[in-house]
Amino acid sequence: MDPGDPLWQVPAGGAARFSWEYDDHRARLLALYQKGKDKQWDAVKRIDWGLDVDPYDPLGTPDESLALHGTRHWDRMTDRDKGELRHHVAAWQFSQFLHGEQGAMVCAARIVESAPDLDAKFYSATQTMDEARHAELYGRFLHDKLGTFYPINTDLRTLLGDTLRDSRWDMAYLGMQVLIEGLALAAFGLIRDTTDKPLPQQILAYVMQDEARHVAFGRMALRDYYRQLSDAELREREEFVIEGCYLMRDRLRGVEVLENFGIPKAEAEEYCEQSPFLHMFRKLLFSRIVPCVKDIGLWGERLQRAYVDMGVLELGDSNLDQLMNQDEELAERLDRRRFATEEAERTGEVEEAIAEGAAAEAEA
């Protein structure tokens, strides 16, 4: 695919805000800021980049997850063709993850500049570093392990552009962290929980551990801020959420991959819409977004009607804290398992060296 112009410039407006009130901070956000500092990690060292990745089955997810599975095209494909399709689907997914993380990095930096409260600036500074790390590792996975990139999806670019063009700091967070990152978390979690490949599992688990903190920050900062807004201001933000949710539900389907395999766009869209996997993913997508939207105070009648139309209103009562705690625990469990294996290997090497030394002494 033609990647187009490698540089995308989005006009930015709004004011940079400084706060000289250094002592009056919210304890909750400062505690989250401390956690953000404590939980920093190095993508070069924490990820085991020596793990091999099969380019024709990089994620190990079931073939039933592919939109072409079960169609007339699938029946005519060779095993090599199917491997190429798995490769391109993974490359498209991780390319969108990469583009989204760069967007998150820019938005977090925007919040550092424009948020009125110093505690929000402090935390957003740590999040900016987190997002840079995520972009780094997704870029490395694509470059070193897959060797294939896809341009940013047109509709993801539209939503990201709308988010960045708004000069209000809360809109940067609402569009990026609640909507786009909510979509990403659903995709991350689905692959993390279905892949049998250790490298993508590590990457996704560790990224989601960071994102659990980001969601907590967004809920605190936006919930406090939205209590101060008028009904008209809240309605404006609800309209933004409604448009963004419909856009993500209806347009982020990976049609570009099928077009790359010579399938006409209309037919590719039909296959994607008929995919049971896509229907399941859409439900999971809103499992992260709807309870967060409700929690921050955007729950007007029109927004609720939109969620009824999407069939996801009941997700507003989901336990978001439980989901975030599970994300953190899964990453910690992966660390414990990995370190235990490495410790056992080191112990075995030491014991082997001792045994070899003892044998040499006995022979002498």
Image (spheres, grey):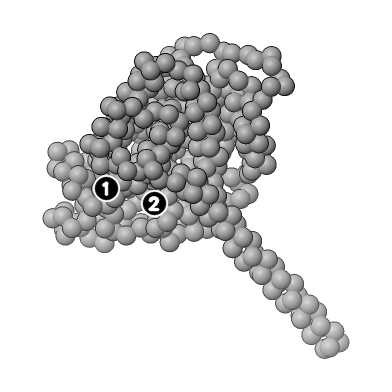
Residue at position x 35%, y 34% in the image? 151
Q: Which amino acid does label 1 sit on?
A: Leu
- 95 w.r.t. 360: above or below: above
Q: Is residue 198 visible?
A: yes
Left or right: 364 in relation to 109: right
| The N terminus - image quarter | top left
Residue 190 is tagged as 2
- 199 w.r.t. 289: above or below: below
- 261 w.r.t. 167: above or below: below
Label 2 SS: helix
Q: Which quadrant of the structure image shows residue 297?
A: top left
Residue at position x 27%, y 47% in the image? 278
Residue located beneath label 1 in the image: 278
Left or right: 130 in relation to 266: right
Q: Position of residue 114 (x, y in %)?
A: 55, 17
- 62 w.r.t. 39: above or below: below
Residue at the extreme bottom: 363
